[in-house]
Image (cartoon, rainbow, N blue to C red):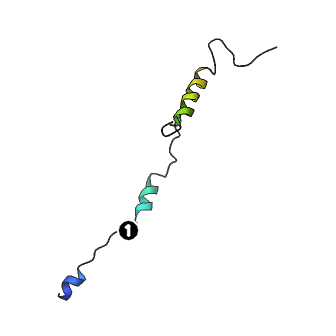
Amino acid sequence: MNKLSQLNGKSKNHTAHNQSHKDHKNGIKKPRRQRQTSTKGMDPKFVRNQRYTRKHNKKKGDSGFEVE
């Protein structure tokens, strides 16, 4: 092998140069919170029970609390 092929055998793999500058150019913003959290991956038995509790939590014409 000659020396020229040994010198040109490697190349740059990764650099983070200028990336943080590009990130801050428009500002780093927090992601907007979703109104409802996903039930994907939750225990199906728990999700089913939660669905029924939400359904019967406030019935039509019911104020939600008792007045004496």
Label 1, on which residue? 15
Q: Can you say which quadrant of the picture contains the C terminus? A: top right
Q: Is residue 52 above or below residue 42?
A: above
Q: Is residue 16 above or below residue 35?
A: below
Where's residue 14, x and y in %? 35, 68
Q: Can you say which quadrant of the picture contains the N terminus? A: bottom left
Residue at image location 67% in from the left, 14% down from the top = 62
Residue at image location 51% in from the left, 36% down from the top = 39
Where's residue 45, x and y in %? 55, 32
| Nearer to me, 56 or 29 | 56
- Taking 28 as reference, is 50 left or right? right
Q: Quadrant of residue 63?
A: top right
The single residue placed furthest to the front in the displayed view is: 45
SS at mark 1 in the image: loop
- Taking 5 as reference, is 45 left or right? right
| Nearer to me, 32 or 59 | 59
Residue type (three-letter) at the residue carrying disc 1: Thr
Residue at image location 57% in from the left, 33% down from the top = 46
- Taking 1 as reference, is 29 left or right? right
Q: Residues within 10 Å of mark 1 (few under 14, many from 20)?
A: few
| Nearer to me, 27 or 12 | 12
Where's residue 8, x and y in %? 23, 80
